[in-house]
Image (cartoon, grey):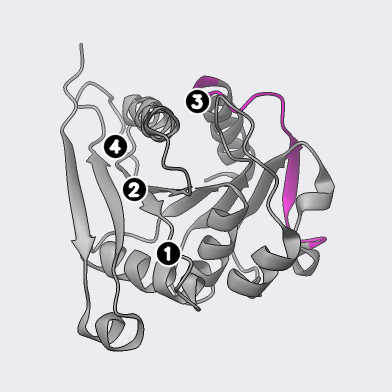
Amino acid sequence: MFKLQRLVQRIDFVSAKHISLLNKRTKFTLAKMDASETCPIQRPTPILLLNTIATKDVHDKQDIFDWSNKLQSQFSKEGYFSVSINMTLPDKEDKEPLKTCYQELKQATSELSFFPPLMISSGEIAWRISQKYVSNRPVSGLIMVEEHQKQQPPPINQEILDKFYPTSEFEPHFPLLMISSSSSSVPHFLNGWIDHINLESTSSHHLFKTIIQWMDDIGM
């Protein structure tokens, strides 16, 4: 058995700027997992996983945490250090939830001080947060995958999504991948710049194999 060093911390992040503007705080969990000591190769590119949590159902939350943990474990076996962030979405009173999520994600990752990561975001809202992140912060690549839940999540109202979590366009100067059941989910400004793989399963095992194969194909 390989040794995994895992640190999970519950963060109640509050900044003076957020207090003055929003008078609230957003919570998220951050989990780090080192590369396995038994892996002969230690990969230089860290993995950054981003999930958003809109549900209050304990079982759905645990399902997201378990999925992230399994994915991290598989990356660890292959010599990758990874960080998983599961972010609870701001309350409805927050008029700029995308800005709130981005600021907290930026704060969390800036404290890690690591090499530009391969970012993997799961679900439409996480895609929007990751788009804003990569438009302002250095990354080695971005992968957007459909949300994983045992129970099919309710569809997101597109008008509400665009209003509170608008698309952040960026210059695509790094590898991009969308793993989804339809190519129509690809943001319009990335057409012609992003690889697309049809989704067969969102299980951590299948997703990991798909991602590793794509990384090998592009020489990452």
**Residue at position x 37%, y 27% from top?**
66
The alpha-carbon separation of the residues under discs 1 and 2 comes to 37 Å
Q: Which amino acid, mark 3?
A: Ser
First reached walking from the N terminus: tag 3 or tag 2: 2
* Residue 42, disc: 4
The residues bearing labels 4 and 1 have C-alpha atoms spaced at a distance of 40 Å
Q: Which of marks 3 and 2 is in front?
A: 3
Secondary structure beneath dot 4 equals loop
CA neighbours of label 3 inside 10 A, class few (<14), some (14 to 19), many (20+)? some
The percent position of residue 202, horizontal first and vertical second, equals 60, 28
- Tag 2–tag 4 contact (CB < 8 Å): yes
| Residue 44's disc number | 2
Label 3 vs label 4, nearer the camera: 3
Quadrant of the image for the N terminus? top left
Separation of disc 3 and disc 1 at Cα?
29 Å
SS assignment for the magenta stretch, majority: loop
Of the image marks 3 and 4, the number of the one nearer the N terminus: 4
As displayed, is residue 64 above or below residue 139?
above
Q: Which residue is labeled 3 in the image?
A: 204
- In percent of the image, x 75 and y 44: which residue is there? 196
Nearer to me, 147 or 109? 147
Q: Is 101 drawn above or below residue 40 in the view shown? A: below
Which residue is tagged 1?
91
Q: In which quarter of the image is residue 34?
A: top left
Residue 78, placed above or below residue 92: above
